[in-house]
Structure formats: C-alpha cells, structure tokens
Image (cartoon, coloured by chain):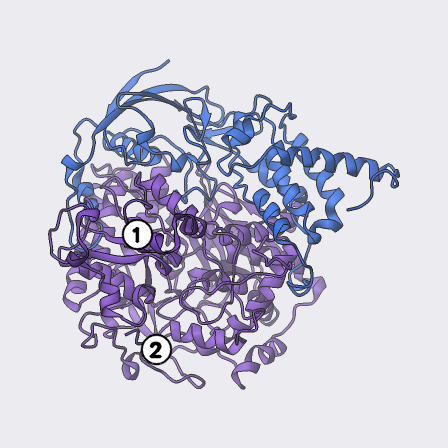
Amino acid sequence: MSDRTHVGCGCQRGASHEGAGHGGAAVHVDERRVNVMSVRLRVWRQKHAGDKGGFVEYDAGRLTPDMSFLEMLDVVNEDLQRDGDEPIAFDSDCREGICGACSLVIDGVPHGPGQGVTTCQVYMRNFSDGATITIEPWRAQAFPVVRDLIVDRSAFDRIIGAGGYNSTNTGSATDANSALISQAQAEEAFDAAACIGCGACVATCKNASAMLFVAAKVKHLNILPQGQPERRQRTVAMLKAMDDEGFGHCTNEYECEAVCPKEISVEHIAFLNREYLRAQVLSSGMRPVITEA
Amino acid sequence: MALDGHTPGGPLAEKWDRHRFDLKLVNPANKRKHTVIIVGTGLAGASAAATLAELGYNVKSFCIQDSPRRAHSIAAQGGINAAKNYQNDGDSVYRLFYDTIKGGDYRAREANVYRLAQESVNIIDQCVAQGVPFAREYGGTLANRSFGGAQVSRTFYARGQTGQQLLLGAYGSLMRQVHAGKVELYARHEMLELVVVEGVARGIVTRDLTTGKMESHVADAVLLCTGGYGNAFFLSTNAKGSNVTASWRAHRRGAYFANPCYTQIHPTCIPVAGGFQAKLTLMSESLRNDGRVWVPSAPGDQRAPEQIPEGDRDYYLERRYPSFGNLVPRDVASRAAKQACDEGRGVGATGRAVYLDFADAIRRDGESLIRQKYGNLFQMYEEITNENPYKSPMRIYPAVHYTMGGLWVDYNLMSNLPGLFVLGEANFSDHGANRLGASALMQGLSDGYFVIPYTLGGYIAGTPLTDINTSHPAFVDAEKEAQGRLDALLAVQGKRTVDDFHRELGLLLWDHCGMARTGAGLTQALERVREIRQQFWQNVTVSGSTGELNQALERAGRVADFMEFAETMIHDALARDESCGGHFREEHQTEEGEARRDDENFAHVSAWEFTGPGEKPTLHKEALEFQNVALTQRSYK
C-alpha cells in the first residue's frame, strides 16, 4: 500500500532562501556551513475519518541537523505543494512546547526521541543521515483520526467540562492572600498543573487510558484550599467522563510518564486512586474511617 | 472626522465607577434572550465567554485551534502585573497607571489605562480562586517580582508559564459553562466574515475547518478576541496559526484599524538559523540581568567568541547607556542590536545576532547560582541551538513579539461599528506605542472578566435590535463572498507556495517597517507590497478543495489578508512622522540616537477606515488628552 514520492530534490525554492537573512538587509546563509542531510519518511496518510488510510513514503533531502522535526515536515510540505500534491496534515501551533497541539508518533514513540519534549522540540540532529522515520497519528478509540496525522482530542475538553475547575463565578473571589498556601504545596500543585493536554499519555498506553491526564488535573485542584468544596464531586465526575469517552483503564505500565513532555509523574495516578476511594467511602457514609483533609 | 472615545467625565479615579452606574442593566431574566458571539478563546475570549455565560447570556465561542486551551495566550512566560502592593514597596493603582502610560510613550488613553490598573487587583483574586498556582513565599502569601525595569515588585508569576496557568483557569471556567449548556463551543472553526445589518454587527460567517462547511451565526453582539498581527512578519514569536483575518474582515466591513504601525520587537530571542525557520523563540528578558551584550569591535571578525580578547569586544549597551547598561527597555536594546549587525559586526552563521555572555556572571556567582536562576532558559537555548551557553555566549537577536495596534474601540471596548466589541491584543486601547512586560495578560483578563460584562450589558439594554435569521441577505451575501474568496485562491493554480509569499512579505516588512523605519523605505515598501500581493494572486499554489480539512487553504486565506493589512500598516508608519515607543522613524531621533516624539502634531490615535483593496485608507484621528500626567522624554543614559 505504500508508494513513494520524491521531494526536496532540487526544486525551485524561490524567495525562500532569502528568508535566512530575516533581519536588516537580506543575508544569505552560507550553505557550506550547514550540514546537509536526508531521510526517508513513512507517513500515515488518511483523507478523512472514514478513509482506511495507509503509509506513504517520501524521500526528504537538503535538510539540516538544526531544523526542528516540524520544520522538516514544513519543507516536505512546501515541496509537495510545488508539485501540486496535497501537503501532510498535522497539528502544531506555538512550536515551543507549551500549547500541546503537536502530536506525532515518531518511530513508535509519541513526541519521538528525547526526554521531556513535545514533537515541535525534536530536532533533526536526533536522527542519523539516511534514516527511515515512521510518522503516525495518536492512535486511540477516543481520539479518532480527522485527517493524516490530526486527531480529534475534544474528549479531553469534555472531561475538563465535567469537573476540571473550581466553580467560582467572576467577581465572587476573596482577596488573593486570604488563603495561605505553602510554597511546597503550590509547587506540588504546579507540577500537576503543568500538563499541556497533548494526549501523548493516551497515545502510548496499550489501554489508551487517560488516567495521567485526569490525575494531573484532579491533583492540581484537589490539594489546594480553593479546590476543597468540590473535591469528591470533581474526582468522581471526571473519572466517569473519562470512562464515558471510551478511554481505557490504568494497568500501571508507566509508559505515560515516560513519554509525557512535561514529565508528569505516575504518582499522581496513585493520588487519583486514593481520591476516588476516599470519595466512595465518604459517600457510603463511613465517615469515621477516612477524615476530610 | 474626529473620533470620540466616549471617555466618561469626572475625576480619573471615579470615571469607571460613575460609568458603571450610568450603564443600563439587562434584567437577569432577560439575559437568556440574548446571544453573544465570541471569537477567540485566549485570555480575553475565554474569560469573556465564561463570565457572560455565568451572567446568563447565551454564548457561542469560536476558536481555530482543536481546543480552546491552546490559544496563544498559553505561551506567555513572564507574569501578570497587579497593583496589589502586597510588598508594601510603594505601589498603587495610580503608580501602575502612571508606569503604563509612560511606558506606552504617551500614546494611550488615560481613562482606559487607569481602569486597567484598577481592575488588575481583581484579576489576581479571581485567578487564585480558580486555583492558579502562583509562586508563593515561605509564609504562604503570594510572591512578586520586579519585571521589565519596574521599580516596584508587582508582577505575579507561575514559574515561566504564567500565561498557561491563567489560560487554564479561564478555560476551566469556560468548559464549566459549556458543560452547563450556556456556551456552545465551536473549536476548529474560523471566522471568515463579519455580518453587518443596517450598520450594526449582527453575526459572523465561519468555516468548519474539519469539513470545510460554511456556516452563519446570528447574535446580538460580536466580540473579537483574536489576538495580534505579529505574524504579518512571517517570523515572530507568535504561534504559527496566529493571524489578522478576523480583525481584517471586520475592518473591511467598516471597523477602523488603529495604530497598526505599533509593533513590539523583543530583544532576547533565539536568532534565525536558516531559510527553513518556521518561527522564533523568545527567552525571558530576565537574562539581561546577568548577561552582558557584546559584538566584536571590528566588522567581519570571524573568530570564535572565546578567542576574541576583551580589548576587541564592544559591550555597546554598557558603553552607550552607562546608567541602565544591559537593562535598557526592549525597544532601545532591540534597535542597538540591529545597528551593530548593520555595521557588519553581527555574529553567527547569518551575521544577524549579538552575544549575550554569562562568563562574568558565572565567574562572579558560580555556575550553580546561574543554573538556579536561568537553568530552564539555558536548557531551552541548548535544545534549540545545540550549543552550551555555560561554555560559550548565547547568540540573541530581536524578534516581533506583540502588537499594540488593533481595531479601534471606545471606552466601552466597542468599535465604531455598533455591536462589534474588541478585547485583548486585538484592540488598540491600553498600551500606547509600547507595552510594558507583564501587562498583556493583565489587559486580556481585565477586558474579559471585568470590563465587557458591564459595557456589553449597557449596549444590549440600550439598543433595540430587529429580529433576523441567517436567511437575511446580509448573511447570504457574506457567505457567498467568503466562499468566493476560497474558490479564487484554489483557482490560481500557480507555482509558488503560500509560505514562500508569506516569507517574502515578512522580510519586506521587517526591513522597512520593523525596528527602524524611514520615509523613503516605507514608500518603497508600499510599492513592493502591492507587487507581492499581485504576484500572490497570480502565482500562488493551493492544493485540495474547500470541502475538506485543508491547511494550505487556511494559510492562503490568512496570508491574503496579511498582504492587504501590510499596506495599512505601512501607511500608518508613513503618516506617523515622529518616533514613539516601538515606532522608530530614523528621521526623528535625538543626537544620541534616541526616539524623538512630536507631541504637538502626533498626540493622537490614528484610526484607518478601509476604502478598498490597494486604495489608501482614510485617516481618522482621536486626540489624546493628558490631564493627569505630564509628557516627558525618556532617557536611559
């Protein structure tokens, strides 16, 4: 099912070379000073959700090790368009690792090589010249493919809608310093709140579980004083929403932590399990067993 | 025509209070009868959508991203200002107001800026209640830092991810209202037209980016919260998808575009590495607290930095500005870097970079202290450049970062088109000609949480609207126009890609309408922009069709709008024959090379009216009156 397209083989680049001098008078990058490399890509192409899809191979040349992985795909896409072909569709936006839009499985690993990075923070220097690189979308029942490498992650939004907030209407807040929060507690909440909602945890999990995502949000809010009134309700509602969306359960493989670009710890999942148990026990009326924190 | 900003009367400190009392209220039971469209889900859009839904309005919220949580506010690093005076160091609402109006080089409206400073304190309360994990002191109170040269510590921050945490707070509130059925969420939808009925904004036309389907939406008011136009330059620190289309489409329907020549260029960004570069990355300017900026004294010095002896180095900021040194404001630092590179003294492969050297700081404080202070930034630098900044100096260069101009709005945040409101970076209102650090987040949230809920109510309560639906000819025509534009882009079938044209446009703007501008350069650029735009419509290639997810088509539409917008930006830069804030006209500088304002002739807002593509827009002026602050010249010697 794979055919091959050659791109980047000496096509017209027009004004794009001049872009090197972005700043003041146009300055040409001295091409002798950059290392030229080429790779073969195996890319998942799928027209729309209902299409069967398959891998297509592309030879990408005239790359440099200082290109980001997504800049490499930009170059491939520009060449495809010059040939009148449809570019490879993929999500990306901030290109600095914070928006959570980019979402490629590179050689079987969500966000590719490197620890604590998103796809947009992967550089071509991570690959050897002449390498074959396989690129796929996140794969999970709850993240249906929209086109090529783009998936629908709106299930995450709905999980947040079920309880990922403190229900405080604008205007009703007390003075910001009225509740004291220790530095350690604020840091702990932040560690969980750093989640960018990219979904790599789901993509890497054999059960396509969203436990790390849910745990991070629950932990962030449930340990802060402002999050206490809805602590039980939030935990139960978000987990139910996760189940309803078709995400699987956690079987402690810890792969989610390994690929998380923000290195969010699986310890949060243990916390979530305790919170769930606590909520169940409290709602069954066994108050004396576990006390409110 | 003179524009009226509808600033309320009375003393500065009482204007907002009086105005809130004067504004009509919408009966709580009636709010559900009104629909509000909000385009964009960044800090301004998400906070407005959540708050208006809490009040009872029906809200339709649109964003181009796959989730509202990914709007570009998420990338803001530094912090958010508020006049809480928790540090007891002399801050006050008036001081924040004063610093902001001065920092904007006296080109903002006093009353707006004062209101912003007043509301700043409420923002922090609201965000903490949402669970935003701001930095804390050991005793559990909120921590502050001094930022961007401010003499008081008023900046609240959440590590280097303040924008992310504030947006997640607003996004949570928004999703709560989506879950409650009060907000209808349209992710992956792009606004392609504003619909104006009998002179009043009544809706929008959108394209579902997944299916390509064109849709019309009717409302009682439309709020644009769609960010800035920095990506006109192709390379900027903005997210790839950030664009001017929503603003530009509204402008074409009659909304005035104010001060488009005001752009902020941030001095500490990672330089361009090659022609393939897709975007630029900002590093916090806190780096300038310990790093020393220098270039070789002699042009063309190709030696590695370690081999250049002290005597052959020019620490030009320290030399030119002995009292502020490396800490001069953003615009001054940026221009000085450009000048050094223009003299042939730039470093790195492209010659468009200067060194930011920590060797002295490491010798003085030790590597571990520097690592503690800047570890994440050094790591980011190394990840991108593959160079170790502990061993050899960083290379930095300025990049487009924020745009102060935007659609013109009055004190109520309403444009000259009744029913069209503009919030956050998309409007022009609060930062004048230069924005201070940690003020963008403050403005977005002030507009969304605390200003629009009042002023929108005043508009709705006081404006009888006719009952219309999407079969109204104005909607039918707007849909047809939007579809026609997409069809036209696909029909060109040329040879050059959208990005190729965008790069060319960006370079032109950067060269002639960037850090320094001249009358001659701008005139030349105006002509060239028209040529590029013409070539674009003759030779662009866009594959695929309109009835599917088509990223090339999305980009083509946005770049087509940047092409038109660029001309207005240049017209504005030409007409503003003075230097102020981020707008530096080389003809207007002091003997020391500093910006020279012309308050007699240019203490006004320039608001441009669209007259047709390629036609010179019509200029309307809103006079800026300063009743509370004295206009002074900045000096950093």
Task: Locate residue B168 relative to residue B325 in the image: left or right.
Answer: right
Q: Position of residue B504 (x, y in %)?
A: 21, 48
Which chain is the one coloured purple?
A: B
Q: For mark 2, what is the residue?
A: B604
Label 2: few (<14), some or many (≥20) within 10 Å?
Answer: many
Name the residue located 18 percent from the left edge and 41 percent from the top edge: A17
- B344, above or below A281, in the image: below
Cα distance in 3D space between marks 1 and 2: 46 Å
Residue A1: image quadrant is top left
Q: Is residue B24 visible?
A: yes
Seen as rendered, the residue at the extreme top is A1
Quadrant, the N terminus of chain B = bottom left
Quadrant, the C terminus of chain B = bottom left
Tint applied to chain A in the drawing: blue
Q: The residue under label 1 is which amino acid type?
A: Ala
Residue B619: image quadrant is bottom left
Q: Position of residue B520 (x, y in %)?
A: 14, 66
Query: Which residue is nearer to you in this view: B357 or A60?
Result: B357
Residue A188: image quadrant is top right
Instruction: Indicate the secondary structure of the residue bearing disc 1.
Output: helix
Chain bearing tag 2 is B
Q: For mark 1, what is the residue?
A: B359
Label 1: few (<14), some or many (≥20) within 10 Å?
Answer: some
Task: Locate residue B78 relative to residue B237 in the image: left or right.
Answer: right
Task: Locate residue B214 relative to residue B24 in the image: left or right.
Answer: left
Query: Which residue is nearer to you in this view: A90 or B392?
Result: B392
Name the residue located 73 percent from the left edge and 35 percent from the top edge: A274
Tag count: 2
Query: Which residue is nearer to you in this view: B7 or B111?
Result: B111
Q: The residue under label 2 is which amino acid type?
A: His
